[in-house]
Image: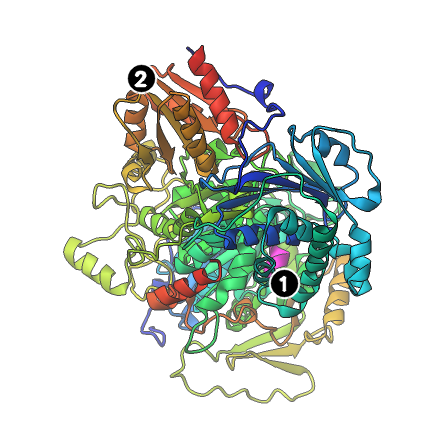
Amino acid sequence: MCAVTIHSETLTEPKSSGYEPGVNDFAMMVATKNGSGSQTSNEVLIRSLFRMGIPVSGKNLFPSNIKGLPTWYTIRASKDGYIARRATTEVAITFNQDTAAEDVQNLPPGGICILPQEWKWTHSRDDIIYYEVPVKPIIAESNIPKDFQDRIGNMVYVGAVAYLFDIPLDIIEQALLDTFNGKQKPAAMNFGVVQRAYDWSRENLEKKHSLRFEKMDGTKGKLLMTGNEAAALGSLFGGLTVAAWYPITPSTSLIDAVMEHKGIRKDPDTGQDTVAIIQAEDELAAMGMIVGAGWAGARAMTATSGPGISLMAEFAGLAYFAEIPCVIWDVTRIGPSTGLPTRTGQCDLLFLHFLSHGDTRQVVIIPANVAECFEFGWRAFDIAERLQTPVFVMSDLDLGMNLWLSDPYTYPDTPMDRGKTLDKEKLEQFFAERGEWYRYRDYDGDGIPYRTVPGTDHPRAAYFTRGTGHDDRAVYSERSEDWVKNMDRLRRKLENARSFLPQPIIDYDPNKKIGIISYGSNDPAIAEARDRLAAAGIETNYLRIRALPLAHEVHDFVMNHDRVYVVENNFDGQMHQILRMELPQDTTHMISLALGDTLPMTARWIHTQILRQEQE
Amino acid sequence: MANALGLERAEYRGAPSTLCPGCGHDSISNQIISAAYDLSLPMHRVAKFSGIGCSSKTPAYFLGRSHGFNAVHGRMPSVVTGAVTANRDLIALAVSGDGDTGSIGLGQFKHIIRRNVPMVYIIENNGVYGLTKGQFSATADEGQQLKYYGKNELPPIDLCMEAIIGGATFVARSFSGDAKQVQTLLKAAISHKGTAVLDIISPCVTFNNAETSTKSYSYGKANEIPLHEIEFIAGGYVPEREEITIGDYAEGETIAVEMHDGSVIRLKKLGKDHDPRNRLAALSLLEEAQMDQIFLTGLIYYEEPRMTLAETLNLTDTPLTQLPEHKLRPSRETLDELMQRFM
Ligand SMILES: Cc1ncc(C[n+]2csc(CCOP(=O)(O)OP(=O)(O)O)c2C)c(N)n1
Ligand code: SF4
Ligand SMILES: [Mg+2]
């Protein structure tokens, strides 16, 4: 068997959902127009199921557009706690006439379609159930101020769904309050429409299906949050002091959340802010700002996506070489240039790891879930200051912008690690003990030098920071010995980082001969695929990479299996390439399963791919 | 002679220069050393910045006891913005070139001015790219000839005009050969609370020193027309000094400009009757000077500083880099409360 990258020929999944739907175990797709207010309705449904204790996930498939283009939102309820995306759904709420025909076609046999009655749609399929609700008449009766009527129509399907699938109205009411941040007035206005639609449905619709929701105990103690918001909170708990950014989907909501929550960091003594948030003129400047701030001793961060990373490349090399701590969140989207700005993928991996000209090997850490976004939010600063290097955190659109069920966050369990930074007293002590201090000298043998920051009141604290060649005294040097010595030390620093960075999460049983390696937000799809594979008699081990450069255990994991599938969501199998580059041995047993189809990965895709390979 | 901090002038020096002998940039470094020494600047509070170019190399050649950062080409302003936001106590002294600021860095130049980040922004303007061996820069004279690159057909960008239009609150022009004026303007710029732009014509003796160039020594020496005779009376940095006496500036031809720290610049009118506090007048002055190819120097524009970036952001008076950990990490209870909202 050889290492192959499998692409789109197997992309389209069969129409039958491949699932046995049941109570608290089915998926709904909501098709609407962008900007029609459906985001609120969908969020209310998700929050309602969450409040009922049902494990739930939501995936927003939205266009790069403000108003008018089609948007699809998938809500999946899973009593077993599977929260990966599903490609097919049992229920379609088709509220967008432009796509309705196709949306109906995509339903599996026995599927359910909910649509506006006033369309007078011909029922093109006789193997599905249609429910029609009079959207406009319900709105008309609801006494909604004219300005809001346009955006509230989608509450009608919330009412219909509540009746058809048994979501209690008091729960919807509560979810509305959650969605509107506790604001009574809009919540009440929307609830009026929901109630009317519910009542109409109860009086006029005859239930012809058995799928429904019922309360359970699957979300107790859990949070419902986006990765971007978690990252923002993590950063604030990590001592972020300077954030510089330039707006770009899907990273914008990360900085928005920093702004929203920065109140928790007001100085209680003066009421002044301890976090500076600067909207830069472009990403290049944003990166320059955090490099300047990190150099001066701040915990500095930016958030961007691929196009922004491109602009940051020169500064990334300078910061790597001049050894300046800073944190860069790359909430990835897909494609070169603008690509598909509202779709997800893991396409920036190689780019981040090798970002900049010259020999650079950047540190990349990769959260897989919301709790890890919080953790890496604060930990990234510790890593950056400890290693004195830029730290890239690779999240993605799916993790960053969609709502996820999450375990609660763990409060940072260690004090902040400010690294080898010498203040006045420490510098005096350093001189007393060693008789010297040079900025880039490796005193501890770990490749990490000692630094000072400007403002240190000591006559010998200063040094000159530059991107040009320098010796270990930070003096300009064009001598090749100095160059090589410095590069050697940087390499040593990065080598040591392998065991210092977040280690992989490994589920390993020596009796199993098939391994899966993946990273980031593919995690829930992999968990589900492994269960399905096990049910089909294929037992797998699993290693989830959390950092580059790779931990040593990754090597062992690859070598301890007969076959290893490297599952990732980019077109080129980028992690597979890194693994092949880093492993000296023959790795033909390592198979690339690279998707890159612009969508969050499904369990079904992984399961089908591995099954097919294993049967060969 | 030691200054108020007990330091000799020599202690304000940096590493020996590696620029071409006679390069205008070295004269400016010298004036920076003198100004800092005269003002008794505490060197540990000074942070030096630059982009890339011969000019941008110079921060290594002055104030050796200050941290310095030689950044990337044209992007020094963003680095200053970050550093000064992180530590608002820093005195930022930055050097750039006409290529560094007028071409690749024009965007960042405009934006740091707009944000009013407190700093001294020196442009060592020679009309060419020195370090890459003599290409035209965007400030080169129209019609100028260069050895390899022929004739420049494009009109120059006037960086002082750009600064004024961009909202700078301190804009001056000088000539590196005019040690006294450069030094006086530097002192005033250092005392200014906001982005202070100093466009200093600084001949490149290697690539642009033809008599015809307005950026040559001979041209500068022969044609420099100072707007005013400038005198600077220090205020701020060494508090224990005697109270400043401003003297008699009410006399008809002298304007006194008082800086936020109590320093005063006295401008004694020479040829032109220019009030540097009038923005439109400053712009027309520059426009006329450009049309007549006159080389005017002095304080061209000054206004009461707007809020600095740190003030706009409502940052703590204590520099962010000096906040203790308990002000940087909210409590466990705060986290628990926050999580409740998402449950
Ligand atoms: C991104 C980038 N592009 C090009 C260069 C090459 N480069 C170095 S200095 C310079 C021009 C410097 O001109 P100026 O700012 O006027 O400084 P001078 O040498 O004249 O003092 C150029 C183009 C570079 N260092 N970085
Ligand atoms: S090339 Fe010109 S600008 Fe550069 S050091 Fe020589 S004289 Fe100065
Ligand atoms: Mg130049």
Q: Height in image: A598 above or below A167?
A: above
Position of residue A414 measured from the top left corner of the image (x, y, whole percent): 28, 56
Q: Is residue A509 left or right of residue B258?
A: left
Q: Quadrant of the C terminus of chain A?
A: top left
Q: Is residue B235 left or right of residue B219?
A: left
Chain letter belonging to callout 1: B
Q: Is residue B97 visible in the rendered structure shown here?
A: no
Q: Height in image: B182 above or below A160?
A: below
Marks 1 & 2, CB-CB < 8 Å contact: no
Q: Mark 2: which secondary structure?
A: loop
Q: Which residue has dot 1 on it?
A: B114
Position of residue A477 measured from the top left corner of the image (x, y, whole percent): 36, 40
In-front residue for pair B259/B147: B259
| Numbered-mark total | 2
Q: Is residue A165 visible in the rendered structure shown here?
A: yes
**Residue B73 located within the stretch drawn in magenta:** no
Residue at 34% from the left image edge and 67% from the top image edge? B326
Q: Residues within 10 Å of mark 2 (few under 14, many from 20)?
A: few
Amino acid type of disc 2? Gln
Q: Is residue B68 left or right of residue A91?
A: left
Q: Which residue has dot 2 on it?
A: A585
Q: CA distance from mark 1 to mark 2?
A: 56 Å
Which one is closest to the eye, mark 1 or mark 2? Answer: 2
Position of residue B133 measured from the top left corner of the image (x, y, whole percent): 56, 38
Magenta part of the protein: which range? B108-113
Task: Determine the image quadrant of residue A235.
Answer: bottom left
Amino acid type of disc 1? Arg
Helix, strand or loop: magenta stretch: helix
Q: Which mark is residue A523?
A: none
Chain letter belonging to callout 2: A
